[in-house]
Image: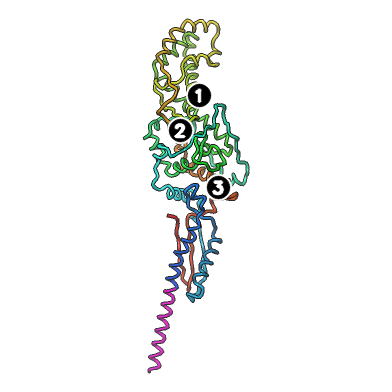
Amino acid sequence: MLAIIFTGFALCIAGAVGVSRRMVVSSECETFGRLWTKAVLSEYDVHLLDDYSIMAYFGNDDEVTAKLDSYLNYSTKGRLGAYIKGANADLTGFELGDPANFRKALRLGFAGSAASEVINGTGRTYRDLDTGEGFDEEGRVINNPVVIDTLPSHGMGGSVSGEQLTERAKTAGGENGLIGMLSGGGAEVLLLERCFDNHVTKADDKNHLLVNEWEYVITGSTDDEKNYRAIRRRLFIARNALNLAAIYKDPAKVEMIVTIAEAITPGPLGAATQALIAEVWAALETEEDLEDLYHDRRVPVLKSPEQWKTDIWAVLGSGKIKSKLDDEAREKLEEKHGEISDLSGKIKTVTQFSEGLNYDEYLMIMIASLKDSVRILRIMDLIQINMKYRYYADFNMMEYYTGVRFTIEANGKSHEFEDAYK
């Protein structure tokens, strides 16, 4: 009987020890697993963090699994006395190249920031690249097919036309209107403002492959000069339409245009001449506007009569108007010289504005008007391009991760772990 009793106690004690051991093994696996997720996440790329406020680490399933196995062997060797099958990492769904994950990383990096910072300014520097003769920088073109094919956007099309800019600019004429528009872009807009250059202003002194990065986001060409010229055309179209509308809203300008048209082409052709004069005048005013924008000055969206810069004599001296003048038209125009001078004296001109939007803000209107999918992918393109240019020739966003997931099997039980940057 005593032997039976002692045997029973021994079996109970052995069972309790076995259960306790399994509980200890399970508890230590859970503790170490949480520690190892932090260890993997702690190996974030410092260049991504310093340059773009993005936390992500380089790796793949096999590399992370090998790393976890080494942690597992070191932590459990001679301690747990249990059957440890090993770790198995699965990073699917955490790729930085996934736009959803990229957006989460941006929101984490720019937490607490607001679109109003773009309006108030945070230290962007005027570049002074444009001398009025066009594109002055050495044009950079990305020709490497591997670089182009691995860009996150994969050449996705989509842009904003000059006509769309015209309509959007009308609603963003004031600071509050622009802030409301940029709020939809969230952290993406702030990233552009803080980390990327455009033709007129730069964000920092780091090396950038492309000169016109904001312009790239809008047009998507891997030819730097094409991006510059495409944006210049859109700005001209928008400003020209807005200036033409301002002309027809100003009775003094309309009266002057009618007087000149009657002097040049009296009769039925006068209406066509009026339209020509108005278009030439709007175009000349637009050229002045672009000069201001490319020198980091402001241009009102919808100009009042007091904000006009060009006078009628510049219009009459233009080639398009001169080509319509024969001797008889010149004589008639000379007869109206005094009347035109009196009318032009009623139109005041200015040389610079303290209100309106500058080049950055006009471009931000276009950027905010892009489809979300196009905007985010082209921003990702720029990061990948610059990371290749500055640090790693083989940098690819799809090889960087914002979280980690793995399992550990010990004593036949699977322990699952998942964590991400927060």
Marks 2 and 1 close (CB-CB < 8 Å): no
Q: Secondary structure at mark 2?
A: helix
Image location (x, y in percent) of residue 342: 41, 10
Q: Secondary structure at mark 3?
A: helix
- Mark 1: give few (<14), some (14-19) or many (20+) Cα within 10 Å: some
Tell me which numbered mark, 1 or 3, is placed earlier along the sequence: 1
**Residue type, label 3:** Met
Characterize the magenta stretch by its predominant secondary structure: helix
Q: Is residue 21 magenta?
A: yes
Residue shown at the point (48%, 44%) measured from the top left: 376
Q: Is residue 406 magenta?
A: no
Residue shown at the point (55%, 47%) measured from the top left: 387
Q: Secondary structure at mark 1?
A: helix
Task: Measure the alpha-carbon separation of dots 2 and 1.
Answer: 16 Å
- Stretch of the chain drawn in magenta: 1-24
Which residue does the numbered mark 2 point to in the structure image?
362
